[in-house]
Image (tube, helix red, strand yellow):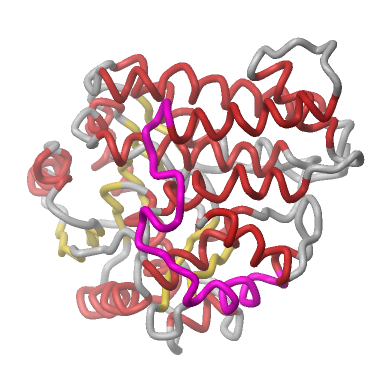
Amino acid sequence: MNNFTYSVPTTVHFGKGQISQLTDSVKLYGSRVLLVYGGGSIKKNGVYDAATALLKENNIFYVDLDGVEPNPRVETVARGAALCREHDIDVVIALGGGSSIDCAKIVCAATNYDGDPWDLIIGTGSVPETVLPLIAVLTLAATGSEMDPVAVISNMTLNRKLSIGHPALRPKVAIMDPEYTFSVPKYQTASGTADIFSHTLESFFSPVRSAYLQNQFCLAILKTCMKYGPIALEEPDNYEARANLMWASSWAINDTLKKGNEIGWSVHPLEHELSAYYDITHGVGLAILTPHWMRAVLSEETVDRFVTLATELYGFDASLPAMELADLAIDATAKFFFETLGLPSTLKEVGIDETHLEAMAHNCKARLSQGFVPLTPEQNLEIYKAAL
């Protein structure tokens, strides 16, 4: 196991009615709030009314940044930072899923940054020492952004979707009430479950063979997705299912799985190109690409990872030949995404053709050269073509 330093300083309030912790959490950092959210779902599920009522009761000023896109745009970040400066905001609250939280993270950083917020994403600008504190009120189990230090932002003018990671971006507080996910539609529940599953696989497929505990954590999270994803689809108000998926989403990416087990992720950079050009749902793109990536990296050197999946996750007979078990694991993963969760299985189903495949394969070459199995642009292109 490799050396690491581990710190997850996010305070989590998990369970029914934990929105009651909101105002005390705000008062730890200030009294002037920016609320960041997407569309009307937070007004339908009651979280917006609950949050604003608490703020009003406690005489806490707030202003809204609404309309955050599913793949949050840098222009929306800039609008949020401008609101923070205009209204002297000292605390940001994200209401929603990963899109709202990611947008809010960069708003927090960009408020005290003099340049274009896109500079922070591409690394030509440095995250300032004074980053506004962020409170995440989660309404969708998917990205795990409520406990991680990473944000993903899109620049549709440049057809780029890139991530930035910095310790200062990790939320100070996460309020996680599974009841706020009861109203999440089937498609978003399925894509969120696929997102959790993909995050976990990215850490599981590591060349570090001595990180036994982390790998067992990975298997536990994958099993949680397989057990509770289908239940949440059929029984959207099943608290046990929603609670387990919500907690799994946080642990899939809060650094627990990575530490001592780190590797450059592969499927996410491939998918970010799809979202940058076509603005598709992130979890759906991950589901479509993952089985094809698995086949691309399978070899005699990597087959042991697949064998573990086949036997310990999917329950196949360990006496079968290793390559046969690997094929069974890949097929079972595809079946979970496309049959159990009911997600699209091809890029064509989500409106993607061959037009930009070569450009996308080239754009992610640097990140794919550092993955579990380093891949070339030519190999990236083959994955895209296989997924069509």
- The residue that appears at 27% across and 16% down in the rendered structure is 238
Relative to 163, say whether 318 is above or below. Answer: above
Please, is residue 183 above or below residue 188 in the view? Answer: above
The one of 178 and 234 positioned closer to us in this rendering: 234
Decide if residue 336 is on the left or right side of residue 297. Answer: left
Residue 172 appears in the figure: no
For residue 235, what is the image quadrant? top left
Percent coordinates x, y for residue 375 in the rendering = 77, 62
- Magenta stretch holds residue 288: no
Residue 228 to residue 360: above or below: above
List x then y, in percent, for residue 252: 57, 36
Query: Percent x, y for residue 138?
Result: 32, 41
Towards the viewer: 58 or 17: 17
Q: Is residue 194 left or right of residue 299?
A: left
- Front position in the image: 95 or 171: 95
| Above-or-below relation of 359 to 337 | below
Query: Is 365 inside the magenta-drawn segment?
Result: yes
Query: Which residue appears farthest toward the bottom when viewing the image?
Result: 115
Q: Which residues are magenta?
A: 339-366
Q: Provide residue 7's location: percent of width, then percent of height.
A: 65, 43
The answer to whether residue 283 is seen in the rendering is yes
Label tally:
0
Q: Which residue is painted at 26% across and 34% down in the image?
A: 186
Q: Residue at x 41, y 64 (%)?
A: 352
Quadrant in the picture for the N terminus: top right
Residue 301 falls left or right of residue 372: right
